[in-house]
Image (cartoon, rainbow, N blue to C red):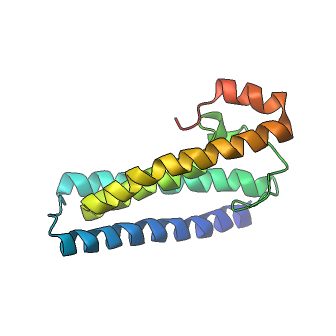
Amino acid sequence: MIAVIAKSILHNIGVLLVSLLVAYLGAYADSLLGIASFASVVARIAGCSLLALGFFVRTWAAVHFYQHGLRVVSLRPQAVLITSGPYRFSRNPLYLGGNVFMFFGAALLLGSVTALAITALHLPLIDRFIRREEVQLEQEFGEAFVNYAKRTRRWL
């Protein structure tokens, strides 16, 4: 179990670094465009809180994936439908933790308007990707996925 947790943490350090890089590039773009930073103590506290929450949610979700012998990043449909742990609350805790909480958190931490815009603009693309994945999951797991989708929200 310790190896699974360590693997999950290491995997999500990469996601954390990517979210910070996007926010940094957004802040750099802000400076080139003359957009003022909205950095403040409140924004930084909110940003750090969202980063921590996102890291926790993603790590918890990754632990469940690795416990079932699945890969977090896979181009092929998964062989197991996970409905426990964070998957009881959201059908997509990996996306929620990373693409929402961590990316918004990093943007708030650095006070970047551009990073906030990039994060907000990419969410419809992620949602479209998720809907495509859900079609595959329904084909793979049938009624089990349909019942799961009825009782568990896509995001929150």
Residue 91, quarter of the rendered image: top right
Instruction: State the residue at coordinates (77%, 54%).
Output: 67
Vertical arrangement, residue 149 with respect to residue 54, above or below: above
Instruction: State the residue at coordinates (50%, 57%).
Output: 55
Say which quadrant the N terminus sits in.
Answer: bottom right
Let me know if residue 35 appears in the view: yes
Q: Nearer the viewer, residue 64 or 90?
A: 90
Instruction: State the residue at coordinates (17%, 58%).
Output: 38
Instruction: State the residue at coordinates (72%, 29%).
Output: 148
Residue 19, image x, y percentages: 44, 65
Question: Looking at the image, how many numbered discs can be counted on the residues?
Answer: 0
Horizontal side of residue 79 vs 125, given as left or right: right
Residue 89, image x, y percentages: 59, 34
Q: Nearer the viewer, residue 1 or 38?
A: 38
Residue 65, image x, y percentages: 73, 53
Let me know if residue 82 appears in the view: no
Horizontal side of residue 40 vs 7, given as left or right: left
Residue 98, image x, y percentages: 51, 56
